[in-house]
Image (cartoon, rainbow, N blue to C red):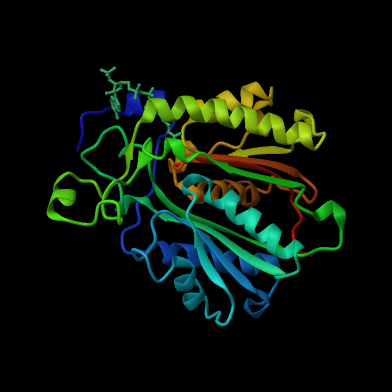
Amino acid sequence: MVDTSDEWIIKRTGIKTRHIAQNETTSDMGTKAALQAIERSGLAKDDIDMIVCATISPDYFCMPSTACMIAKKLGISNVPAFDISAACTGFIYALATAKAFIESKMAKNVLIVGTERLSAIVDYTDRTTCILFGDGAGAAVVSASEKKEEAIMDVHICADGKYHDYLITPGCGTNKPCSEEVLKERECFIHMKGNETFKVAVKTLTNDVVDILAKNGIDSDDISYFVPHQANYRILNAVASALKLKKEQVVVTVDKYGNTSSASIPMAINDLYESNKLSKGDLLLLDAFGGGFTWGSALVPFAPHS
Ligand code: UT7
């Protein structure tokens, strides 16, 4: 489709395969991941008292939210359900939201979902972006607990809108409503200043993870697994090297799934879980960076529902 090569893509990004949804919407994939998460939690669907969905590729432009579609497909009604728009950092924003609602006692069991059908908003004539993105979904149930060792240790979320045009879908919003010109210029698709984004991402993420570890008195050796957003192997490797993490501490799935935006972190945690590498009490360091720019990190002990 475009002038590129397997060799270039693997060398510059680490991506070998990606998955493209054929007949599924973003909420279809999110619902499947959510059902799996609820089943593994041992809770009943009725126990879920809030649904938060992070996505930049919603089923519908504006409304209804993808969270509402997931709630409908799960058969859960009469609970708050809403989307979070924080691009690739969406899952960490959702985690922060769940933590805040639970700590303020406004919710007990929050379903958080990261789901993306990015293939619907990727321009397959643009070689600088179309080789990066894939589709997928992941989910988790975050619950209240009296046990301190099970608590999310810390979540840090941040943004700087001065970089808003580095990673953007320029058309079809109120800034530039849908028109023939917008469609002709392919402005309803993802546009990215890749190299500039890369540089800000490495610097910002490194500072962010160093800060969250220092703030919580955690050494790199205390981290069981570093689960970064999977945008580019070179980015996550640069951050892991700055923290002097060992190879076995770093979770890499970008080779298998490409960049799935808000879904990449829960999908990577799921890979760990399904390969039986996760044990109760393992400390996860999450980090993500995305359009906005937004970024964030979290320290989360793996505490399966018993
Ligand atoms: O998830 C949210 C955050 N996203 C990110 O953090 C992604 C950040 N960016 C990246 O991952 C990388 O910048 C890219 C993978 C997008 C690009 O890699 P790069 O090493 O920064 O390459 P570049 O943009 O500096 O381009 C180098 C060359 C250019 O050619 P010239 O000008 O040197 O002749 C590009 O036109 O590579 C060319 N190029 C390609 N060549 C073959 C760009 N895309 C391709 C391609 N195939 N697909």
Q: Describe residue 131's horizontal placement relative to residue 289 as left or right.
A: left
Q: Is residue 13 visible?
A: no
Please report the residue visible at 49 percent of the width from the left and 50 percent of the height from the top.
Answer: 86
Of the 4 image quadrants, the one containing the N terminus is: top left
Q: Position of residue 199 (x, y in %)?
A: 47, 24
The total of numbered circles placed on residues is 0
Q: Residue at x 30, y 32 (%)?
A: 128
Residue 136 rendering spot, x and y as whole percentages: 45, 53
Residue depicted at x 55% and y 30%: 236
Viewer-closest of 137 and 166 = 166
Image point (69%, 38%), residue name: 225
Classify the position of the C terminus by image quarter. Answer: bottom right
Residue 275 in the image: state x and y as whole percent: 63, 47
- 114 shown above or below 10: below
Q: Position of residue 118 (x, y in %)?
A: 36, 51
Residue 225 shows up from this direction: yes
Residue 276 falls left or right of residue 86? right
Identify which residue, 167 or 122, lies in the foreground.
167
Left or right position of 152 against 115? right
Q: Nearer the viewer, residue 16 or 41?
A: 41
**Residue 52's image quarter?**
bottom right
Which quadrant does ligand 1 occupy? top left
